[in-house]
């Protein structure tokens, strides 16, 4: 597959919880989905900005909310990338399965952000990482998370990142 002049290929399984305006409410919870990019016996020419993302953002207290409003919880999804007997010509610009807890009001509690799972598996494959405009070439497997803001900030959990490279050419 050659994206050529199409630009920057994106794959999203993102989730966003709804915001809340009412006193005593809680922002909606969000759980990222699953992204799978499998290059098996082929070649993907993706350029320098391939972005497979399963990020989640919990709902927050709306701008007009008053009183105690809590942020929603967020749970990152799963991002699977595998190259088996194949080639990737390109770079991942980002797109981890992270989570951002929603913001509570000044009297509320921030939502929790719990990371998902990033898996990168390569067996007898090749990556020719291409640089972006600043010259950075990246292949990333990460999860980045944060708790929401509030009178009491939300908690966060790191998630999981797995990289396996075997029978490398």
Image: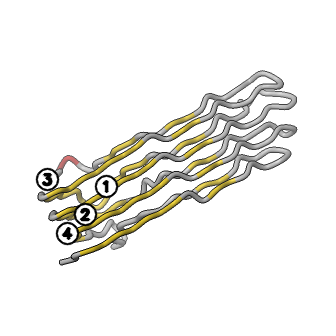
Q: Earlier in the sequence, mark 4 or mark 2?
A: 2
**Residue drawn 74% across and 30% down?**
26
Compared to residue 75, the image places residue 62 above or below, namely above
Q: Of 66 and 84, which appears nearest the observer?
A: 84
**CA distance separating discs 3 and 2:** 11 Å
Secondary structure at badge 4 equals: loop
Residue designated by label 2: 90
Q: Position of residue 4 (x, y in %)?
A: 15, 53
Residue designated by label 4: 125
**Residue drawn 32% across and 56% down?**
81
**CA distance separating discs 1 and 2:** 7 Å
Q: Earlier in the sequence, mark 3 or mark 2?
A: 3
Q: In which quadrant of the rendered view does residue 145 lie?
A: bottom right
Asked whether disc 1 touches disc 2, contact meaning CB atoms under 8 Å apart, the reply is: yes
Secondary structure at badge 3 equals: loop
Left/right placement of residue 99 relative to residue 130 reads right
**CA distance separating discs 4 and 2:** 13 Å
Q: In which quadrant of the rendered view does residue 34 lie?
A: top left
Label 3 packing within 10 angstroms: few (<14), some (14-19), many (20+) = few
Q: Position of residue 69 (x, y in %)?
A: 80, 31
Q: In which quadrant of the rendered view does residue 56 lie?
A: top right
Q: Position of residue 31 (x, y in %)?
A: 54, 38
Q: Of 22 and 75, which appears nearest the observer?
A: 75
Residue designated by label 3: 2
Q: Position of residue 93 (x, y in %)?
A: 38, 59
Residue 50 got which mark? Answer: 1
Q: Nearer the viewer, mark 3 or mark 4?
A: 4
Secondary structure at badge 1 equals: strand
């Amino acid at each position: 597959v050659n994206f050529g002049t199409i630009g920057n290929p994106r794959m999203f399984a993102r989730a966003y919880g709804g915001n809340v305006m009412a006193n005593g409410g809680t922002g909606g919870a969000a759980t990222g989905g699953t992204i799978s990019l499998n290059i098996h016996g082929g070649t993907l020419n993706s350029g320098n900005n391939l972005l497979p993302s399963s990020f989640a953002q919990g709902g927050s207290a709306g701008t007009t909310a008053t009183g105690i409003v809590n942020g929603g919880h967020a749970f990152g999804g799963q991002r699977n990338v595998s190259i088996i007997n194949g080639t990737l010509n390109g770079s991942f610009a980002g797109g981890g399965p992270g989570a951002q807890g929603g913001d509570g009001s000044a009297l509320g509690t921030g939502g929790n952000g719990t990371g998902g799972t990033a898996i990168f598996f390569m067996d007898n494959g090749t990556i020719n990482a291409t640089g972006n405009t600043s010259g950075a070439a990246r292949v990333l497997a990460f999860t980045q998370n944060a708790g929401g803001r509030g009178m009491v900030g939300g908690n966060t959990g790191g998630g999981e990142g797995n990289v396996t490279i075997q029978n490398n050419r």
